[in-house]
Image: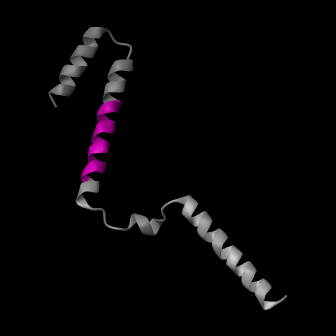
C-alpha cells in the first residue's frame, strides 16, 4: 500500500469522525463549561414555568367538579 493511499484513508477516517462528532451534539466536556448568569437565570425560569404548567395540566385534567378546580387554583395562587 502506497503512502498516498494510507494518507487518503487516514484523512477520510478523520473527516468521518469529525462529521459524526458534530452531528452527535455537545459532549460531556461542553457541559463542564461555566454557564453565564443570564443563561442560568433563563434555565431556572424555564424549570419554574414547566412546573407551573404541570400543576395547571393536573388541575385541569383531574375529574373533579368545577368547584374543586376553583379551590385548586386559589390554593396554588396563595403559594
Q: Where is 26 relative to 77, above or below?
A: below
Q: Residue at x 31, y 29 (%)?
A: 55
Task: Name the image quarter holding the N terminus.
Answer: bottom right
Task: Name the image quarter holding the C terminus.
Answer: top left
How far across and down, in percent of the image, does residue 70 sit?
23, 14
**Residue 7 as seen in the image, left or right of residue 1:** left
Q: Residue at x 48, y 62 (%)?
A: 26
Please give the count of numbered marks on the rendered protein: 0
Residue 38 versus residue 28: which sits nearer the camera? 38
**Which quarter of the picture shows residue 48?**
top left
How far across and down, in percent of the image, does residue 75 sit?
19, 23
How far across and down, in percent of the image, does residue 28 sit?
46, 66
Q: Where is 64 relative to 25, above or below?
A: above
Residue 72 versus residue 33: which sits nearer the camera? 33
Is residue 15 inside the magenta stretch?
A: no
Q: Where is 77 relative to 67, above or below?
A: below
* Magenta stretch, residue numbers: 41-54
Is residue 48 inside the magenta stretch?
A: yes
**Residue 26 as seen in the image, left or right of residue 58:** right
Residue 34 versus residue 73: which sits nearer the camera? 34
How far across and down, in percent of the image, does residue 52 sit?
29, 33
**Which quarter of the picture shows residue 14?**
bottom right
Farthest right residue in view: 1
Q: Residue at x 69, y 74 (%)?
A: 13
Residue 19 versus residue 49: which sits nearer the camera? 19
**Residue 67 as seen in the image, left or right of residue 79:** right
Amino acid at each position: 500500500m502506497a503512502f498516498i493511499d494510507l494518507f487518503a484513508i487516514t484523512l477520510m477516517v478523520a473527516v468521518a469522525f469529525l462529521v459524526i462528532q458534530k452531528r452527535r451534539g455537545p459532549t460531556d466536556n461542553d457541559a463542564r463549561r461555566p454557564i453565564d448568569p443570564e443563561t442560568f437565570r433563563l434555565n431556572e425560569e424555564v424549570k419554574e414555568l414547566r412546573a407551573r404548567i404541570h400543576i395547571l395540566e393536573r388541575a385541569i385534567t383531574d375529574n373533579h367538579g368545577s368547584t374543586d378546580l376553583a379551590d385548586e387554583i386559589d390554593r396554588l395562587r396563595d403559594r
